[in-house]
Amino acid sequence: MNIAYHLKTVYRNFISQRPYSFLNLIGLIIGLCISFIALLYVTEETGYDTFHENSKDIYRLLTKEINSDEIASPNTTAHIGKELQEEIPEIKNVIRYKNAFFRINGLIEARGIYADPELFNVFTFNITAGNIESFKDDVFVIVISEEFALREFGAIDVVGKSIELEKEEKIKYTIRAVYKEFPKKSTLKPSYILPIKSQIKEKVPGVEISSFNTYFLLEKNSNHNDTAAKVLKKGYKLQSLEDIHLHSDGSIKVLLSYALIGVLILLISLLNFLLLYTAITQRRFKEFAIRKVNGLSELGLLKMFMVESIIISLIAATLAIILVGLVLPFFNSFTKSNIEFSWFSNAPFFIYAIGLVIVVALLSGYKLYHYLNKYNAIEFIGKTKTSKKTNFFLKSNGLALQLIIVSFMLIFSLGYYKQLDFILTSDKGYNPKHVFVIGGLAINSEIFKEEAKKHPEISDVAMGQPIPDPTGSSITRIHNIDSPSELVEMELFSVDYNYIPLYGITITEGRNFSNEFITDKMDAIILNETAVKLLNLEKPIGIKTNMGTIIGVVKDFNFEALHKSIRPSIFKVVTENNSSKMIIGYKPEDKENTIAIIETLLGNQNVQLANILNPTYSDPEMINIFGSMEEARKQIFDPNYMDSVNEMFYEKEKTLQKTILLLTIIAMFITILGLIGMSLFKTQQKTKEIGIRKVNGATITEIMLMLNKDFIKWVVIAFVIACPIAYYAMRKWLENFAYKTSLSWWVFALAGVFTLVIALVTVSWQTYRAATRNPVESLRDE
């Protein structure tokens, strides 16, 4: 095979058919670039936790969500795992862990866990120093990561040393072992591990709190599906360790969305490539006629198209790879991803990308060969009309399919935006604005509250769990004293007397907690409306429960993302040192002054905090830990905390919405390239007809209408087909939300009008040029 000859042929064809070839190559490069980025994202997000030797046999236990029949919550009680192990022999080991929140050197370290000693046997740990023998028997021992050791001690050789962890009081732990950090693709990434023995209380029916994660190691030779079925009969579900990353927080839906968009844009660019390449091929009929007359066989024709297609695809793929390298930092910033583009970090991507390019090249080459192979040499020379030889692309079906995809993406993007606007602006039942949150600091809360209330800029101060809270809340079980068997799981809010009025939560029955009632501190509880309904209480005020006497009922409010329906919740007065988080209400016009006041009050209580909050202060160790002093200050007091947390709940939706919109624009751009090429092809085909019509008195408007009507027809047909598909897709997507917007008619109408306008504007400039051309020149050229 003479590669140089084929390269020269491709170059000659590119130069001789410049308008088509340029549009063709640009469309294919952009399409491959987007597909490569989507492929990068998919390979980056898959393959989690496979480095564990027992990954195929490790399963997480899931329980029912509160106020729901869906078994999807990883929060379990401490004893359920052992109970299931006794009943199901295929369960070899049970591992429990729960999050540990301690202050270290005055700052919260949130990546710690309490865990069973079996954790080190079931999961694959690389112990680089020490051993875990004493982890099973001793309570005050700790196992830490190398990164944690370097951060706190500046060295890895720290076995035998002690470290103080602080919550309500300082506790000294002895370091027994150091382990290497888990790989990037790991769902479990603790910085330190403590024995769980101190967290396991004796089982008391009805008062267990679901704050543990439970994992099972199943017997290797057992049928895991049968074991899962047995667990399901008990009212629980097993989730494979390798599925956790993608199937726990909606990541799989984001991944499938990017994969689908990548496929759609690749399909658009491939259709565009075939459309314009077919048009180029039609202009080479004489060349193929001569080749046929000179003995070009079917195999020779196939080989010629395959080689040309492979060369063009490789050129496009090479330029697309270069483009990926240029736009990937923007994509990472835009989607808050951390995708690396190198052979060592993402080798599977390159393997899949090469396979993708080969498929595109072979498919394109064969399609063009199949189209041309229908003609013989006489038909080539005679330029037989394409209508007699049915061609999918020159009959504009390919372009219509592109318009269907673009219309679908545009409708979905507009519907996505409407739902996102709904969940961000709808009434959530409380006032999240004009609130600061301080938590996890070594300060005297009571003194801080007293000092804060002296300032008129601060409207109120309360203690309790912030709304919303990304760290989650405690879960408890409550029942009517008269009906102890009717247990209802609820979200527990430990709050003080000012909490409910500060957040503007409406009390529908009874009263708020008050200092005037001595019993409120130990015995009183307040429920939300959902909790009252689940307890079947017609007149809840005064009813005694295992958690206390009901003194009030609050209107339901959304303390979680609107993906979920409102769950039952209970409010109870916070006991001393039970919560270190403070909520500070401020007057909106005094925000900046309030920030300065809070920073001063914090600094008055703790010299270290005063230093860190000083804008001129710099600490190399803190910069190493947090990345910058600004981030370190945010760990202490973030003035925009509430806005950040509110946005975090819908971060994936907001990012995906912007990504879909951007990719819809790119898909439309590729389609525009096809429209330009197709309109150019159509006008050149009708050059003589246009000249004759003009000589016979046709106006510019009539000529343009004649040339544009086919394009209008394609847009309308594409829109009609895309509407039901987009409607169905939107309905299925909205099922992810407990609270959803309506699918308004204007979403579809706006998408249809926009697509039509873009298509007409794109083709009209070309048809206008053809319509205004001097007919004498048109007829002379013919």
Image (tube, rainbow, N blue to C red):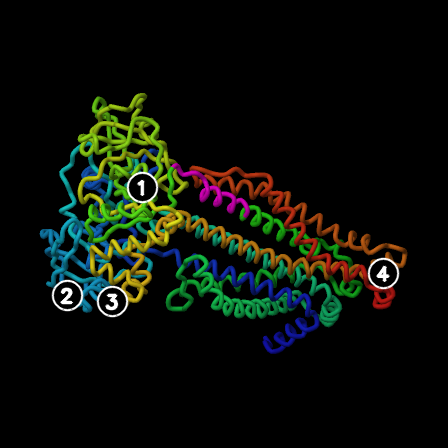
Give the quadrant of residue 688.
Answer: bottom right
Q: Which residue is drawn at 49% across and 43% down?
A: 419
Q: Give the range drawn in magenta.
A: 414-429
Question: Of callouts 4 and 3, which one flags the residue occurring earlier in the amino acid sequence?
Answer: 3
In this view, the residue in front, 20 or 89, is 20
- The residue where tag 3 is placed is 621
- The residue where tag 2 is placed is 158
Disc 1 and disc 3 in contact, CB within 8 angstroms: no
Viewer-side label of 2, 1: 2
Checking the image for residue 372, the label placed there is none
Q: In which quarter of the image is the C terminus?
A: bottom right
Question: Of callouts 1 and 3, which one flags the residue occurring earlier in the amino acid sequence?
Answer: 1
Disc 4 and disc 3 in contact, CB within 8 angstroms: no
Checking the image for residue 691, the label placed there is 4
Query: Which amino acid type is shown beneath numbered disc 3?
Result: Glu
In this view, the residue in front, 451 or 692, is 451
Query: Which amino acid type is shown beneath numbered disc 2?
Result: Val
Could one spot residue 392 in this view of the protein?
Answer: yes
Disc 2 and disc 1 in contact, CB within 8 angstroms: no
| Dominant secondary structure, magenta | helix
Q: In this view, does 163 lie to the left or right of 77?
A: left
Provide the secondary structure element on which disc 2 rests: loop
Q: In which quarter of the image is the N terminus?
A: bottom right
Residue 737 appears at what percent x and percent y?
Answer: 43, 40
